[in-house]
Every structure is written in C-alpha cells, then in structure tokens.
Amino acid sequence: MPEILTMIQVTKMTPTPAVLTIAFLSLLYLMSSNIFALINYVGFATWLSIGVGVLCLPVLRYTQPDLPRPIKVHLIFPAAYLIASVFVTLVPMMASPVETGIGCLMIATSVPVYMVFIAWRNKPKVFTKSVDASTRFLQKILMVVGKSKSPDKV
C-alpha cells in the first residue's frame, strides 16, 4: 500500500490516513441503493479475506515451525474459524452469485495497487518523486509521521 497509509497522527496516535481511506471507501459502498446487496458484497469479501488470513496460521505452523511466535494458539481455533469461513463464503456463492462476484471484484481492486506500489521495483523517477511529494504533502496536511527508516532519525 502507499506509505502514507502506514503513518500515525502525531497528537492522537491514530492511523488517520488509513481511517480516512476506509471512510472514503465506505462512502463509495453506500452509493449502492440496495443495502442487502451491499451487505452481501462486503460480508463475502470480509469473510473471504479474513479466512485466507487465518489460513496462514496453520500453513506457517507446518511450513516454518522455527519462526518465533509471540502468541501461540491451539490449532483447533483456526480450524473452527476456517470451517465457519468456508460456510459463510460458500452459502452466499450459491444463493447470490452476482453479489459474490461483485465482492470478488472488490477484492481484486487491490491487485493493481499492489502491483504499482509493492511489486513494481524499477519505477521511473518521475513516479517516485510524485509519490514522495504527495506523501510529504499529505503528511503536512494530516500531521502524520511514519516509522523512521534508520536509527539516527527520530
């Protein structure tokens, strides 16, 4: 994601840019006139995303058992959650496939953002300068700071 979304407001210690982005996206979602369809779009996308995130726990437990784990849970909990996630995502797929497809499209909108800001390594200088300039501008407007990249920065 863009670096600005990782920054914290200096006086309130809140992730203001991320909260504003979520609020803007929520306003976009409210343009739908059918509240039940909106619930299906967002509900499906949320359960699918969280289910895939929870799936990482047992996968990493078995593929990389030596990683440090500050919190360890019994695998019954992610297994139960995954069963619930599968149920909550498969039922809407069968009951309302159009809304499910729109939910999948909502998730797919993150792919171009990832490709531009994370995966693309050799960005043109014009692009990086404009992103840096917009990040600095938004930092000043929102009064946010990011994590320093070197020990000498405070």
Image (cartoon, rainbow, N blue to C red):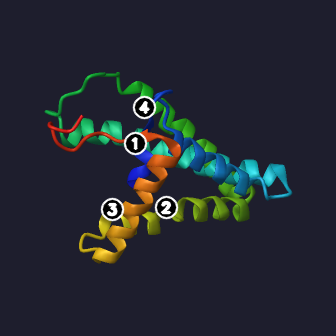
**Location of residue 26 in the rendering, given as x and y in whole percent from the top left corner:** 68, 49
Mark 3 to mark 2 CA distance (whole Å): 11 Å
Q: Secondary structure at mark 4?
A: helix
Residue that badge 3 annotates: 118
Q: Residue at x 29, y 77 (%)?
A: 124
Label pair 1/4, CB-CB below 8 angstroms: yes
Q: Which residue is mark 1?
A: 55
Q: Which residue is mark 4?
A: 78
Counting residues from the start of the chain, the first of labels 2 and 4 encountered is 4
Three-letter residue code for mark 2 = Ser
Q: Could one spot residue 114 in this view of the protein?
A: no
Q: Between disc 1 and disc 3, whose residue precedes? A: 1
The residue positioned 33% from the left and 68% from the top of the image is 129
Q: Position of residue 97 (x, y in %)?
A: 70, 62
The local secondary structure at tag 2 comes to helix
Mark 1 and mark 4 lie on one chain; the one further toward the N terminus is 1
Q: Nearer the viewer, mark 3 or mark 2?
A: 3
